Image (tube, rainbow, N blue to C red):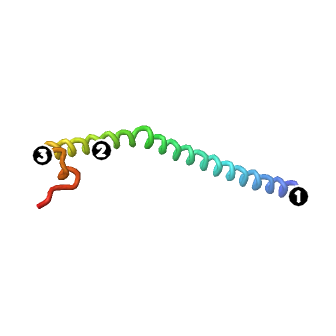
């Protein structure tokens, strides 16, 4: 009978070990997912956003240049 109790203790220690390993594996996968999201943001989204904002700003600046010319008003704004 004591052998059966020992085997139960061994099973509980093995199951806790498995839970720890599963937790570590899940944590590692989560960290890898975060790294992939950071890379996606840095490689795809930032250049796209920068290109879009750059074009918007350049259209605005060119329209302002055509309206005001390259004078003091262009840089400081129109005065009423």
Q: Which secondary structure lies at badge 2?
A: helix
The N terminus is located in which quarter? bottom right
Q: What residue is shown at x 15% (from left), y 44% (from top)? A: 69
Residue at numbered disc 1: 2
Which one is in front, 14 or 33? 33
Q: Which secondary structure lies at badge 3?
A: helix
Give the Cα distance between marks 2 and 3: 21 Å
Kindly identify which numbered label has been placed on residue 67.
3
Q: Is residue 58 left or right of residue 29?
A: left
Q: Is residue 65 left or right of residue 13?
A: left
Q: What residue is shown at x 34% (from left), y 43% (from top)? A: 49
Give the Cα distance between marks 1 and 2: 74 Å
In terms of sequence position, does the residue under pointer 3 or pointer 1 come before the other? 1
Kindly identify which numbered label has been placed on residue 53.
2
- Residue 51 location (% of width, % of height): 32, 39
In this view, the residue farthest toward the bottom is 80
Q: Nearer the viewer, mark 1 or mark 2?
A: 2
Number of other residues with Cα within 10 Å of mark 3, as a class: few under 14, some 14 to 19, many 20 or more: few
Residues under numbered marks 3 and 1 in contact, where contact means CB atoms less than 8 Å apart: no
- Residue 63 location (% of width, % of height): 16, 44
């Amino acid at each position: 009978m004591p052998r059966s109790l020992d085997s139960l203790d061994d099973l509980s220690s093995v199951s806790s070990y498995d839970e720890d390993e599963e937790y570590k594996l899940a944590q590692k996968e989560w960290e890898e997912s975060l790294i992939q999201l950071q890379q996606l943001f840095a490689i795809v989204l930032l250049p796209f956003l920068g290109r879009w904002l750059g074009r918007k700003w350049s259209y605005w600046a060119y329209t302002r240049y055509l309206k005001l010319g390259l004078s003091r008003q262009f840089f400081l704004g129109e005065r009423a």
